Image (cartoon, helix red, strand yellow):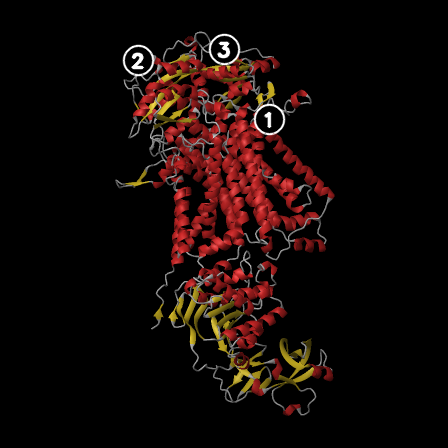
Amino acid sequence: MYFKKNFNKSFNILLLRILIIFVFILVSFFIIIPLLPLFLKSFSDNKNNFIGLENFINYIQNPSLTQSFINSLKVAITTTFFSVLIGFIYAYALTRTRLPLKKFFNTFSLFSLYIPPLAVAIGLIYIFGKQGLITQGFFGTIPGFDINLYGFNGIIIGEIFYCFPQALIILVSALNLSDQRLYEAAESLKASPLRKFLTITLPNIKYGLMNSFFICFILSFTDFGVPKVVGGNFNVLATDIYKQVVGQQNFAMGATISIYLLVPSILAFLIDKNFRKNEASLISGKSIPFKPRKNLIVDSIMFIFCSLILILVIGVFSSIVLASLIKIWPYDISLSLQNFRFSNVAGNGYEPYFNTVFMSIYTAIFGTIFVFFTAYLVEKFKPLKKIRMLIYFFSTLPIAIPGLVLGLSYILFFNKPSFSVPFLDFQIFNPFSLLYGTMGILVLANIIHFFTVCFISATTTLKQIDKEFEEVSESLKVPFYKTFLRITIPLSLPTILEIGSYYFVNSMITVSAIIFLYPAKIPVSSVSIVNMDDAGDTASAAAMSTLIVLTSLFVRLIYEFTSRNISKKSSVWINPLET
Amino acid sequence: MKKLFSFVMGAAVIGTALAPSANAWWWGKKGSEKASITVYTALEDDQIPNYLKSFERDYPNIEVNIVRDSTGIVTAKLLAEAENPQADVVWGLAASSLLVANDRGLIQGYAPKGLSNVKPSFRDPAKKPSWVGIDSWISAFCVNKIEAQKNGLSIPKSWADLTKPEYKGHIVMSNPASSGTGYLSVASRLQNLPSEEDGWNYLDALHANIAQYMHSGSKPCKAAGKGEYPIGISFGYRAVKQVNMGQPIEAVFPKEGSGWDVEANALIKKDKIKPAAKTFLDWAISPEVSREYAKSFAITAVETDVPLPKGFPSNPEKQLAKNDLQWAAVNRERILAEWAKRYDGKSAPK
Amino acid sequence: MIKKEGSFKYLEIKNISKNFGETFVLKNIHLDVFKGEFLCLLGPSGCGKTTLLRIISGLERQTNGDIVQDGLLISNSPTEKRDFGIVFQSYALFPNLNAKQNIAYGLENKKINKKEIEKRTNNLLRLVGLEKYSDQFPSQLSGGQQQRVALARAMALSPGLLLLDEPLSALDAQVRSKLRNEIKLIQKKLNLTTIMVTHDQTEALSMADRVVVMERGHIAQIGTPFELYENPITPFVADFIGKMNLLKGKYDKKNYVFYYLNNRFLISQNTEYSFLENCLLGIRPEDIEIIKFRKNIEKEENILRVKIKEITYLGTIFRLTVVLESKLEENIFVDVISNQVVSNNLKIGDFIDIKLKKEKIKLFESNL
């Protein structure tokens, strides 16, 4: 009856489907499937015989191990409380007050994130340890003060160093979304500052607040670096895994504890997810951004608070630098640069350092591409809804996987040359095993380890970009990938840069995910810091840490410079995403 | 269409980069014509280059890739990689760890050339031994002389001294659950007192004085060196090294004898065993490299004419306490469980 | 309905339905759009008008039914294979491209040389009157200018069909009426078949050749603005297009009499109504006369005595809200020319007689 168009099946849609399925396969193989051998391990003994729940029962019946579980919870709850509190006040100072030297405080707000956790611990020992500067009252010049670093106190301080910047990142962006008009309306109704805070500020940031609680909880619950160095006799789950796997080669029990470690993380994850379901933007596109007024008292209190935090962070960093320059602390305090000559300690000279820099660059480049593309496919298209939802779910999962668990599962999965098919005498070649022992697996482990935070920030940005851009492009017969390159990427550039720098900084300092994975030919500096520290070359470990911090700082400055340039260029079209 | 093609090509490039392509750097330094072997070792970082000098001189065509890490990590890596072993050779890893690896069937028995030079107690008695020792490391106390004086402590001379009330809160040792050195000390105490029961009683008394159990073998000595705690129970080489670094440390070898373990080599079982791996194992017990070992270790598996390193007791062999490596390996799980029950759970927050 | 004899059916919508599970968004929609016609889809929010537009564009898929455009069956064609341009309420201009680049966006993807693109883009800029603004970014343009760029962009590929999704809703009143005329002019000049979605009846009546009134997923009535106003076929259409008083009562078919409470109204015998006796009487406010000062009222037909409840000034006319003493809650609206109110000195609370013009009375089936 009608002349039917013969090109009903669109090449673009086909391509899109293929891409979505491709990304689905990738995230499955990188996130979910590697966890399976770990699960299997937890149900078997060390000779790989299936023993059901025996490991789990053994664990519960061992009082010292259950104590670790309780300790981990204590650490996580305390750290979360303080990190979010400090993060909130700092973020509030940056966004809602006329804090003097705001730019400075902003640039250095994430400084403590650049310091490897182990180096933080070293720095803390130099300040608060038994021979520390403060404990000994600056070589006896003032009365000393002992905070009992080893144990709970030390872990908490170390964890806060690592967690509070993470809370800060989230809360700054939450507090940045504000509507001046709401505050004006409240003022006209004679609301007190407290009332305004409780009825406007808090409800506006409740999702950000919830999210930062969640992230701090999981990070501190699963962290291993800080408790290992300053934990003393205070056992936590992560050090238990270390003891089982590294101390006793008991993989089955290590896997079992990993599962116990996963449970609260996943629980927290589900609560957060459920909470977010109701998330709706309270701030419309027509909001007028909040402009803080001068308030001498608040501004000065905030200035003092932020200065104290920065002094503490810079103090720890300075003591690391000092440690790298001093010959034998505290007995021979002569300075020298000899500790920066790594050739005689790690045997590899500067190789680990450059490996780490390259690894971080690769992670930043490939990770950003992968994360952003995944978020783009999930967020912007309609086909294959269920698969896209699964990709979304998988992508938000890695935050709940502790680095040590990720590393273990990667070693178990990626070092398998083939899989056997159950009930059949048939082996499937595992193509991913080619990655094992290469730089690739380190990059991959880092990409996945830090995937969630990057993914969430990419989807948030993409959500803010008008969906109709894609529709207009379709009507103009422009294929989606062109719009992606020409419109979506330029509009998301600030976020893309932010993701890249986040990946870089974190890859520079990470230990837990790659300590089992790094190949013979590719030593990395964060691991060599652990080794040097273990071997007693604290000064060299501190020197390497100093180099890492300076590199991250350098990259951060490049980032600031580039993003400032970009926003200058794009100020003509007023980037709607930056606020 | 041309632009579409370039897009697909771009995606393909990213794809192949993720699944690494023929990028030599990415793969590591492959492609050279040298035979190459991967060696897992727990020997100290600063020792390795000295040891390897003679190998590199004699076998310029064999490239050695060293993976160095602590005993625990190396062992864990070996076991985790069981299905697809990456290492060709293990060099200088605690014999007790190699016993575990052998138990899982990861080791290929091999009798290296010159095996007859190795003292009998330093090797697996089998004809093709699964492990062959190179040296022995022994436990020792690191005592910080300055801090001891500050705290009015006398230098402890024996294991028994350590349980004196004056040392309460001044001693650190490695956690036997995370460190081989820690286990060495515990196992040695259990074997050298009249009964295991007495051993545990001793450990109870020691526990009362311990300030902290640390997660690595060298940490207690390091902490002593920095004055964090006056006394650290660690191992001999470590103590001597720190003395030589100029720290105010005295290395104490306890009167009752030291716990000890052998650092040993092994050949990893895999489909294709490289001849270079055997060459390496032959070399690793040669008199020449043994002379190098002897510069850092008081006791070596192959007798050498090198004088005893500074700081060790004059008759090191006599310093060795009774130790049955096999017993220590078999009973490990039981002892650690008992240990954890007694001491680990009690480490409650302050 | 005026039938456009000889007009070419450019777009045929055949039995289109769209449902999500049990809920129908669109139900059995039939619609023909003629070549060069300006058609408006009008209705309250949620009536399915936007969904219908999106189905035509392929941005959404129908559950059932077919679409034929220019003789081709396009029911399952993907969006980019269909021949249309679209303008959204939010403009959806690419913020990082200037006006010219936005317009050229679709052209650049075609195998057209740069000169030709330049020429066409300039023509389009001239068409929408924005030659001077070609290098400005969207954020530097006013709302009306942005919408003109969006319009030019939609027309860049010379589509056979232009789809406008509430294009003027975000603009203020003055700009809106100015742009209304411009769009209409351009549309006529290019003889471009256009479908516009709107909820604003004034907009629909002033711009469209034909209006499709939609209600809860189906078409209530199709017709020219005049037809819809004069001959609404449902009370919904009657009250949506303009204003209509609807009184519920009983109809005596034999005698052409409608009973409302105690009042009887004579109905014109020109139309045969075939429905049940319960029905609605409809009359527009301007079709009611005030006869306060005439004599012999008893002899007049279709008279009601009412009380003035409210007087609203609407410029040239006043709208009176009046009620019956016996039914105070039912408002009846009466439009009166201003000077009549002033000269008669009408006040709130006054009793007046009103007369419903017999020939203007319509009856509707009561589905309330």
Give the residue number, with chain letter if any, for mark 2.
Answer: B116
Tell me the subunit letter for badge 3. Answer: B
Q: Residue A51: x, y in percent?
A: 35, 34
- Looking at the rendered structure, the kind of residue marked 2 is Ser
Report the residue marked by disc 1.
A322
Amino acid type of the residue tagged 3 in the rendering: Ser
Query: What distance separates the C-alpha of mark 3 from that of mark 1?
Result: 37 Å
Mark 3: few/some/many CA within 10 Å (<14, 14-19, 20+):
some
Determine which quarter of the picture holds residue B16. top left
- Residue C348 screen position, x and y as percent: 71, 78
**Which residue shows up at 54% across the image and 52% down it?**
A279
User: In the picture, residue A303 is in which quadrant?
Assistant: top right
- A499 left or right, relative to B21: right
Amino acid type, mark 1 = Leu
Instruction: Tell me, yes or no, if residue A41 can be seen here.
Output: yes
Q: Are marks 3 and 1 on the same chain?
A: no
Judged from this view, the residue extending furthest toward the top is: B314
Q: In front here: B220 or B190?
A: B220
Q: Are marks 3 and 2 on the same chain?
A: yes
* Label 3: element kind: loop
